[in-house]
Amino acid sequence: MKNLGYYNGKTGLIEEVTVPITDRAFYFGDGVYDAVMCRNNIPYLLFEHVNRIFDNAELLGIAPPKTKEELSFLITELCRLVDGEEKFVYFQISRGSGIRNHEFTNTKANLCIMIKPQEIKNVYDKVDICSANDVRFHMCNIKTLNLLPSVLSAQHAKNNKCEETVFVRDGYVTECSHSNISILKDGKLITAPADNHILPGVTRAHLILACKKYGIEVIEKKYTLDELIDADEIIVTSSSKMAKGVKRVDSRPVGGRDERNLRLLQEEIYGDYIKATQNKKIGSF
Ligand code: PLP
């Protein structure tokens, strides 16, 4: 199949699978989601992403309709049905369905999955980013479906020919519209603390581990937009882009002063993805 949509057991092309208007995701964004890359039909770091959606569901009092094992198995099986070597897998659990009413319903949670071909490209090319006030709510640690500020800031980035928008809240950098952001300064990695104003990214956690592996000290602390602009390198991390360097912030040239460590960390993160998703077929040429 060229892509795949799944909703509570029904499958078809993404363009064809429909969702009832009673799904609380539709009018409240009342649900959580996660996303992974898949290569050679191996969803990368699926365990971490499934754990996160379950943790997030629990924080919102949503009971997932499947166990972690069932969900992981289903995602892996569905990946096999979609053409292509590299794919992007999106999965969402909404609280349930019912006539619109703010209070919770007692219905079973809904599971939606979408899989489409998507490559990770130009891993080592630096990107431009722009800044904006972080106008999101105070539950950014939970990957909820309430993404309007992220949607608007992603469009803001596009309008400014940038890859991402970096958010600044009360004078401090938090994260980007759909990635985390960290800096290298004087041979150390500085990254905003994993509080309620950032999503604790799986790739950010991987970046921290990579730093530890190479003896790069990691400091989790708040830093300002000026410190970002003055950094030796800026690293934007997400599951679908891995670890990108940055060449301009708000059109001002940045970074370029610690390319050795930047490259080391990028190779560690991308290299692990390639290694973990190697085609395991024996005897194929
Ligand atoms: N921060 C936000 C707001 C995101 O939406 C995402 C990914 O979608 C990330 C960070 C990166 O998280 P991960 O590395 O787990 O993909």
Image: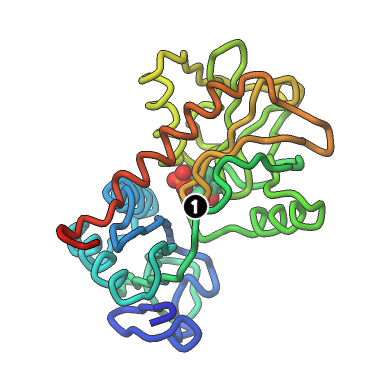
Q: Secondary structure at mark 1?
A: loop
Quadrant containing the N terminus in the rendered view:
bottom left
Q: Is residue 56 above or below residue 6?
A: above
Front position in the image: 92 or 45: 45
The three-letter amino acid code for the residue at tag 1 is Ser
Q: How is the image coloured?
A: rainbow
Q: How many other residues sit within 10 Å of disc 1, few (<14), some (14-19) or many (≥20)? A: many
Q: Is residue 81 left or right of residue 159?
A: left
Residue shown at the point (35%, 48%) measured from the top left: 52
Instruction: State the residue lying farthest toward the top.
Output: 186
* Above/below status of 109 relative to 235: below
Q: Nearer the viewer, residue 61 or 239?
A: 239
Side (left or right) of 119 relative to 227: left
Q: Residue at x 70, y 45 (%)?
A: 165
Q: Position of residue 72 (x, y in %)?
A: 24, 60
- Which residue has dot 1 on it? 240
Up-down: is 187 above or below 75?
A: above
Q: Is residue 140 visible?
A: no
Q: Is mark 1 within 8 Å of ligand 1?
A: yes
Please state which of residues 4 and 82 is positioned toward the viewer in this rendering. Answer: 82
Residue 170: x, y in percent? 71, 30
